[in-house]
Image (cartoon, grey):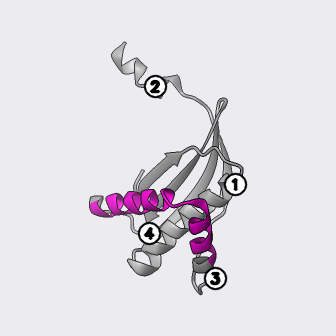
Amino acid sequence: MKGVEIAFQLNNDKESDVVMALGNLTGNYFKSVEHMDITWRIFHVTLDKEKYYRVLYRGEKLSDLHPENKKRIRKKFDELGKTDYNTLMNEYEKESGKEGFEKVGIKELTEEYDLWQDKLWNYI
């Protein structure tokens, strides 16, 4: 995959609000403030009995994102993830009201566990 993939789990009642805020604030920051050609998708993934979120960021160009930009995207996402709920949601509400702010919704995705991709098989 060309781009950045961030996978994580949350365990609170308002998790979809937090996921939307984290994904969209990060994406819009790099799109508007850093002037990067970036797109993103947010998924709620079901894998067997596990559920988690996956946010994918990628550049518009055919080439991969620069490694430094990948690092910066992860860092910004982590910084926002450490913000308390009320502060995060206030920032999201403020930023999402601005012209040009792009909101990407959460898509449901079901995956199957592929034993052949399990690292265990590398050791056998």
Helix or strand or loop: what does disc 1 sit on? loop
The amino acid pointed to by label 3 is Gly
Give the Cα separation between the discs numbered 4 and 1: 31 Å
Please tell me whether residue 14 is drawn above or below residue 124 in the rendered image.
below
On the image, which quarter does residue 62 sit in? bottom left
On the image, which quarter does residue 70 sit in? bottom left
Residue range highlighted in magenta: 68-93
Give the percent coordinates (x, y) of residue 55: 53, 54
Q: Are marks 3 and 2 in contact (CB under 8 Å)?
A: no
Q: Residue at x 71, y 50 (%)?
A: 13
Among the two numbered marks 3 and 2 on one chain, the one whose residue lies closer to the N terminus = 3
Give the Cα separation between the discs numbered 4 and 3: 25 Å
Give the Cα separation between the discs numbered 3 and 2: 43 Å
From the image, tell me which residue sits under label 3: 97
Q: Are marks 1 and 3 in contact (CB under 8 Å)?
A: no
Q: Which tag is nearer the camera, tag 3 or tag 2? A: 3
Crowd band around label 2 with a 10 angstrom C-alpha radius: few (<14), some (14–19), many (20+): few
From the image, tell me which residue sits under label 2: 118
Give the Cα separation between the discs numbered 1 and 3: 20 Å
